[in-house]
Each structure stands twice: as structure tokens, then as C-alpha cells.
Image (cartoon, coloured by chain):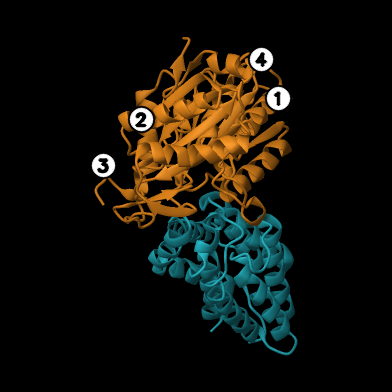
Amino acid sequence: MAALDVTWAVKWLTLSAQAMAEHRSYLIELDRAIGDSDHGENMDRGFQAVLDKLSESPPGTPGAALKLTAMTLMSKVGGAAGPLYGTAFLRAATSLGESAEIDPAALANALAAARDGIVARGKAEPGDKTMVDAWTPAAEAAQKAAVDGDVLAVLVAAAEAAEAGAVATDPLVARKGRASYLGERSAGHRDPGAASSALILRAAVGAAA
Amino acid sequence: MKKLINDPRAVVEESVQGFGLAHANLVTISTDPTFITRKDAPVSGKVGLVSGGGSGHEPLHAGFVGRGMLDAAVPGAVFTSPTPDQILPATLAVNAGAGVVHIVKNYTGDVLNFETAAELAEAEGVSVRTVLVNDDVAVEDSLYTAGRRGVGGTVLVEKIAGAAAERGDDLEAVAAVGERVNANVRTMGVALSACTVPHAGTPSFDLAEDEIEIGIGIHGEPGRHRIPMENADGITDRLLEPVLSDLAIASGDRVLLFVNGMGGTPLSELYIIYRRAAQVLSERGASVERSLVGNYITSLEMQGCSISVLRLDDELRELWDAPVHTAALRWGV
């Protein structure tokens, strides 16, 4: 596959919404252990609203689709996840600009921009047991894959790294977000934000396949 | 799960509707997006006060909208901060030209959403100052966490800053009073049981029949330590000690003592806690000049309480005593 277009972007967001609905209880359960039981509910509500927006005003470019998603998540999700995912999608949209097609380098840059946005808003670092632990390895793997791979290879690399990053949050002690109040007791649980990030990046692969 | 609800997803909407009907003389309800404003907002010449946060802490914040306290409250989903598209119109609705103070509890979600809304309001020409409440001494190592949470002290910040705004203080002065209250109040809480978020359907954490959770926040999140159940005086001592040592309460200090119920504990038990806390303060030579006992910042149906101590001075006491007319606090009117 040479490039991704707006059809891919809309399919990605649709599959992300499906993943959030399907894994709503799983994300609530993760959040119940070390947070406040609302992550699955909020992400499901947010992405359902994204679907409504996409059908109300179909976007013309991948960047426009991601910007619409950013604005909707910021206004519908609430909690920390709303502004964090909102910023991620907004930075990715800005990085893509108005181009109709995304090549491997542009894709990797957009993923890096999303990661930078999350770091800037949430001020978390790798190892703090947050969604940064999924996005940082994902962005790095995407950069590597973009050197000689096609867009599908970049998406697969990002999804696999995000999944491994989410699993790797299990033993960590949280230093940011609500789980940080648990101290040592946050170890032994997966970070819900890293888990939802991995689901969203996996949906991006499904949309290109 | 047994709850007096119709639909887990409609809990906030239907509860706010009922609140508006019950207190139509005090507040106006705006829908889509949802926020609650004081009936006579914007009050000419007055600094506006806006607070908000996840629902499930009632009467906080809507119960404190009215003369002498908040101009607007912005409720999010249960235990989820509200969004900028709610906070912004609430801010604009109560701006009378003197600027607006946001009172924000220090939780990551609340901070991020209020920060975004404040930027948007500034872009529309409204001056916004933010008072961040972080009175929870249960968070020991704030360097390695998201910082101390805003809990019981929030009620006292809203009351006292509200009185400062009502008497005509300007934007900087109202924010400064709010920050002074926050700097002089500390809180610690305990849970005897967890609570159940309506859309989750199961208790927010597991607690055995003979265990209690020390150092809880107000979102049904677990605390720092779990210990075997103790009697009321023992629990009071355990909560009060870190509060008093962090505030460095000494003989001759004048304080306000606030015992807050988490939603599922009877007032009779809160008074047993108050009794012991007042004894300890008196033994330390502190003078309890004002008190507040009741369910003011709750965690749904959680059993438990928090103890807050605010160091008073003449001005803070005068502002505490100033008239207030809201659904949940009312005196002097």
C-alpha cells in the first residue's frame, strides 16, 4: 500500500469506535482497579459522538477527519482522557495539513506529533504508567518502519509497539494521573489509557488491511 | 446494584433537572451544554465564581450556587470532569465585566479541562484567575504523583471566596482570598465502604467487612492504606494527626473544624467524630471558633468521612460568617 487517504481515516475512526464499544467493560474494569471506573464509559461516549459528527459533516481530507475527532473528543469525553486524546488528534491533524494522501514519512510524523501533544498536555514521561507508555514506543517504531516500509508496515509497527508498551505498564508504579494516589499499590495493573491507546492504534491497522 | 435511577446514562441530566425544579428561586439550569447559574447572574460589578467537577459529590457544586457563594457550577459525568464546551459558556454567563475566578480541585482531568476553558475565555476577552484546591494530606509524596487532591477544603474555599466577591473585592483580591483559604486548610478522609458508579454497576473498590481505607479521595478511588476497622475515636485520631501536623497547629491557633460525610454515614456518627476532633484540638490549645458538620462533598453512597481544619484569622472568619443563600448552605438571610 502506497498511501492512506480520507477513506482510511474515516474507517480508522469507525473501527476505533467499535473497539471502544466492544472493550468498554474491559476498560472500566482496568480503571476500577487503579482509577475511578470511568474510562471505558467516557471513551465509548466520545467515539460514538465522533461517528455522529463524521456522518453529519463528512471530512474531505485525513487531516480534517482527525481535527473533527479532536474537537469532538475534547468536548465529549471529559476527565483527563478528553483533553489528552483531543490534543493527540489535533496535533496529528496539524501535522498532516491539507494533503489528501499520507505517505509513510508523513504518517510517522503525525504519530510523533500526537505523542508530543500528549506529553505537552499531560506532562507525563515514559515510565509514569500513562498513555505515554503506549504512544512513545509506537511513535519510535513508526519512525523506524517508515525508513523502508510502506504505510501498512508503519501502522503495524506502531500498533505492536503500543500493545507491548501497554503490557509493560503492568508492573509500573504510577506517577501521574489518578492512579498515582495509590503509590506502590498501582503496580500489577495495566494502565487504562495505555490500553485504550493500543486498541485505537490496532484499529488503524484494521482500517488499512 | 440497587439505585433510585431510571437510566444509568441519564443520572446527571435527570438529577440536574430535579435540582433546577426544586430550587427555581435560586438557580437557572442551562442545557446542552449543562451548567447551573445563579438566578440573578451576571451580578453587576461583581467578580464571577465558577466551579465544577465530576458529578457524584452533591451537594458540591450546584448546591453552593447562590448569593454569597458560586455564580455557576459545571457538572461533568459521574466522577468525570466537565468539558471546556460547558465551562466556557458558564464562565461567559457569569462575567459582569469584573472577571471570573475558576475554583478547581486538583485532579488531572479537572485541571486540563478548566485550563483549556480559561484559555478560550481569555481569547474572548474575559479575565480568568484560577484557584487550585489541593488540601488532601493523604497524598504524601506529591513530587511523584499528580499532587495533593482537592477535597473537603473546596467547600470552604467556595464559601469564603464567594463572600469576598459578594462584598465587592476585585478579581485579584478574590483569587488571593481563595488561595489563602487553600493554604490554611488540610483534609484527610476515610472510607468504610466503596461506592458504585451507576454506569459501572459494581463497587469502585473491594473492601472487606472488617477493613477501612485511609486517605481516600472523593471519586471512589482507593486510598493509601488499608487497615482493620477501629472505633470512632481511633479513626478520628488517625485522620486528624496528619492534618494538624501538616498545618503546624499550635496552642492559640483559631480554627474552623469541618467534619464531612461521604454520603452513606449518618449525621449521628459524624457528630461522634466531631466530638473527638474538638477534644483533640482543645487539648492542643487551639480554639475551635466555627464548625461545619454534614454531607457537603460526597462520594455517592460511600460510607466514611473526612476531617478538615482551616486556620482562621479575623478576615476569614468574617467572610465565613457573611450571608449565604444556596441550596445547601444558608445563613444570615
Among the chains pictured, the one given orange colouring is: B
Q: Residues within 10 Å of mark 1 (few under 14, many from 20)?
A: many
Residue ID for mark 2 = B272
Vertically, is A111 above or below B302?
A: below
Give the image location of residue A106, x and y in percent: 73, 75
Q: Is residue B218 left or right of residue B209?
A: right
Q: Secondary structure at mark 3?
A: loop
B64 up-or-down from A84: above or below: above
Asked if marks 2 and 4 touch (Cβ < 8 Å), the reply is no
> What's the CA distance linking mark 3 and mark 2?
29 Å
> Pointers 4 and 3 in contact (CB under 8 A)?
no
Label 2 is found on which chain of the structure?
B
Cα distance in 3D space between marks 2 and 1: 40 Å
**Helix, strand or loop for disc 1:** helix
Disc 4: host chain: B
**Mark sitting on residue B168:** 4
